[in-house]
Image (cartoon, helix red, strand yellow):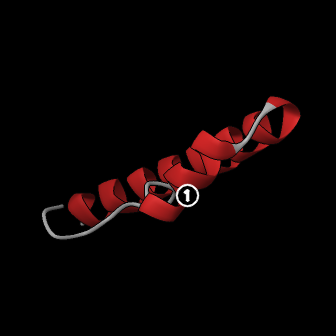
């Protein structure tokens, strides 16, 4: 959806991921991807209405 940012895709989120290492990087990546995909599901639900 133009003009809307999906969760898990923010600049601060990406900076934290770039600076993380090891297990923390994996945890951040998975947490961000879960939120990102939840946002995608919400957007799809809105389009289905």
Closest to the observer, 4 or 40: 4
Tag 1, which secondary structure? helix
The quadrant in which residue 25 appears is: top right
Side of 18 where 39 appears, left or right = left
* Above or below for 5 versus 14: below
Q: Position of residue 2 (x, y in %)?
A: 13, 63
User: Which quadrant, please, contains the C terminus?
Assistant: bottom left
Q: Is residue 38 above or below residue 20?
A: below
Q: Which residue is mark 1?
A: 13
Of residue 42 and residue 49, the one placed in the foreground of this image is 42
What residue is shown at x 82% (from left), y 41% (from top)? 24
**From where the camera sits, is residue 34 visible?**
no
Percent x, y of residue 1: 18, 61
Q: Residue furthest left?
A: 2
| Placement of 29 over or under 8, stated as above or below | above
Q: Position of residue 47 (x, y in %)?
A: 22, 60
Residue for point 65% across, 44% down: 19
């Amino acid at each position: 959806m133009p003009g809307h940012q999906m969760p898990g895709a923010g600049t601060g989120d990406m900076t934290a991921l770039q600076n993380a290492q090891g297990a923390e990087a994996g945890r951040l990546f998975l947490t961000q991807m879960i939120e990102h995909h939840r946002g995608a599901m919400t957007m799809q639900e809105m389009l289905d209405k």
